[in-house]
Image: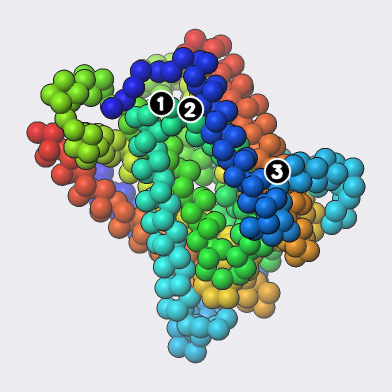
């Protein structure tokens, strides 16, 4: 019942917001079209970018490009970050050796690496992947690390007593037990990946949603700005939702294994 | 297998080895010329540049001056986020209807990266101080709101019921019951907000600004001055760390006072 009430109010709010949008822009003109697009402007921009294209490509091209960069950067960060975090978790020597380097690098916000990435790798894809990697790497490492540290000692000691070989120990105890924390890290990594990508593309890009936003800003084209923002939001939502699905599957398996 | 904790001496030894390897490989790559020194300056070059930037201006100002203008924007954005976010969160925690109305909106906005507001921020508030402040606000606002909301929502129901029974009005209930009870959560939210706000500030300055550390770095990038870019990264890192340390202290102090 509470859920239904909430949904109803949610839809009512959405309807009122859309009405308000019409009222403030098209009907009364309180908010000028130069500041925020009218619904018609938004529609025009959407049609323009999907059919004729804007900033050197159609919406699909830009969105796909951004999406691929996020997925690649995120994957590289996860495949490097999670193993490092797990290793630091179970090997105190590794932790002691890597920690000081981490302490130096960690306070630097990923966005601050954008100029360096452009300097090194130019405006193309490689620079974006480097920045996304840097942004998504840190949460992956930290959360996998704490995931290992939260494993209860008796479990580890039982495995050791039963003579579990190292690779089985990693595959059957370390990873499943740390999985909930690892996924927390992945969610944070994904969010960081999107933020960094948008920023990197806004600073300079040849194709992508950030470029659309940048061009729209320079052309003072509010309709297209809104299209770009919504596209970023939709893709961010879709990838988060997908990761959530993977998490539910992975953790369901984990729970079954525990039982 | 997970080993026992190391002795302090061992921790320091391994730490030095790790740090030595990191700086050693970096220096080697740069000094040997495998990677042109112009693109990968040695650690010492970066530090020299950092020290030089303290007094010689780059992109119109010295590093401390750039930092100062960054801090001004940062403070404005953070204050605004706290002033709007915290009361709104408390109100949402108090009034179910407001919660039901606003939650879906914020849930939706969450997926738009704060930095994607840059074009509208520039359009609405210009590129001087207003635009960047709005971006910082966009980054710092959600944690302020969510944490004060959670704090107010999960206040001991007995406290709320007792105040209701004693006939406390809405305003007093919020100011004297919900607010004090949610302070720990709010402070934790402020710390998260401070980090996100700092990151947003850097992003905003990279894209739209004519002063600040981010602007300095973009100028350095255009001039292919890698040491300056790296010095900027260090400055941003140190400043961010100082902000975090300050807030951590504040948080610990508040927790101690409340006996948590």
Q: Which mark is residue A40?
A: none
Say whether residue B185 is visible: no
Quadrant for residue B153, please give it: top left
Q: Nearer the viewer, residue A83 or B216?
A: A83
Chain under numbered label 2: A
Residue lying at 40% horizontally and 41% vertically, measured from the top left: A84
SS at mark 2 in the image: helix
Residue lying at 51% horizontally and 83% vertically, measured from the top left: A57
Chain under numbered label 1: A
| Position of residue B113 measured from the top left corner of the image (x, y, whole percent) | 51, 56
Mark 2 and 3 residues: CB-CB less than 8 Å, in contact? no
Q: On screen, B52 above or below A210?
A: above
Q: Which residue is mark 1?
A: A92
Say whether residue A240 is visible: yes
SS at mark 1 in the image: helix
Mark 1 and 2 residues: CB-CB less than 8 Å, in contact? yes
Q: Nearer the viewer, residue B123 or B243?
A: B243
SS at mark 3 in the image: helix
Q: Nearer the viewer, residue A24 or A71?
A: A71
Residue at mark 2 shares a chain with residue at mark 3? no
Q: Which residue is mark 3?
A: B43
Residue lying at 88% horizontally and 55% vertically, measured from the top left: B60
Chain under numbered label 3: B
């Amino acid at each position: 019942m509470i859920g239904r009430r909430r949904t109803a109010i949610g839809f009512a709010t959405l309807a009122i917001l859309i009405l308000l949008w019409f009222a403030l822009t098209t009907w009364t003109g309180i908010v000028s079209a130069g500041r925020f697009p009218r619904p018609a402007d938004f529609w025009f921009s959407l049609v323009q970018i999907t059919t004729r294209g804007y900033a050197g490509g159609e919406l699909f091209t830009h969105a796909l490009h951004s999406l691929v960069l996020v997925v690649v950067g995120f994957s590289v960060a996860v495949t490097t970050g999670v193993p490092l975090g797990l290793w630091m978790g179970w090997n105190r020597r590794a932790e002691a050796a890597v920690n000081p380097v981490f302490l130096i690098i960690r306070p630097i916000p990923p966005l601050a690496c954008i100029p360096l990435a452009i300097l090194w790798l130019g405006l193309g894809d490689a620079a974006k992947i480097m920045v996304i990697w840097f942004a998504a790497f840190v949460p992956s490492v930290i959360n996998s690390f704490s995931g290992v540290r939260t494993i209860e000692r008796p479990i580890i000691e039982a495995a050791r007593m039963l003579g579990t070989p190292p690779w089985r120990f990693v595959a059957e105890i370390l990873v499943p037990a740390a999985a909930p924390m690892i996924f927390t890290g992945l969610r944070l990594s994904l969010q960081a990946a999107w933020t960094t990508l948008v920023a990197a593309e806004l600073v300079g890009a040849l194709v992508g949603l950030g470029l659309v936003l940048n061009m729209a800003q320079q052309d003072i084209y509010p309709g297209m700005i809104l299209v770009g923002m919504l596209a970023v939001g939709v893709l961010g939502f879709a990838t988060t939702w997908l990761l959530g699905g993977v998490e539910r599957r992975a953790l369901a398996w984990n729970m079954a294994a525990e039982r | 297998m997970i080993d026992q904790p190391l002795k302090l001496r061992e921790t320091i030894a391994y730490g030095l080895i790790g740090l030595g390897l990191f700086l050693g490989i970096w220096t080697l790559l740069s000094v040997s010329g495998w990677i042109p020194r112009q693109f990968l300056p040695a650690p010492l070059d970066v530090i020299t540049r950092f020290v030089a930037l303290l007094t010689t201006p780059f992109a119109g100002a010295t590093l401390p001056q750039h930092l100062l203008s960054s801090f001004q924007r940062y403070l404005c954005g953070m204050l605004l986020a706290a002033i709007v976010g915290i009361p709104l969160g408390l109100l949402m925690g108090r009034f179910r209807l407001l919660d039901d109305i606003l939650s879906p909106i914020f849930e939706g906005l969450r997926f738009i990266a704060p930095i994607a507001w840059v074009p509208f921020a520039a359009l609405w508030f210009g590129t001087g101080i207003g635009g960047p402040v709005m971006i910082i606000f966009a980054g710092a606002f959600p944690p302020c709101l969510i944490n004060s909301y959670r704090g107010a929502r999960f206040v001991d129901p007995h406290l709320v019921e007792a105040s209701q029974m004693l006939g406390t009005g809405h305003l007093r209930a919020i100011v004297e019951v919900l607010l004090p009870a949610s302070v720990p959560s709010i402070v934790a939210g402020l710390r998260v907000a401070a980090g996100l706000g700092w990151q947003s500030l850097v992003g905003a300055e990279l894209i739209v600004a004519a002063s600040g550390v981010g602007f300095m770095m973009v100028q350095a990038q255009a001039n292919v001055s890698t040491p300056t870019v790296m010095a900027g990264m260090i400055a941003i890192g140190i400043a961010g760390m100082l902000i975090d340390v300050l807030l951590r202290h504040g948080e610990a102090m508040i927790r101690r006072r409340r006996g948590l």
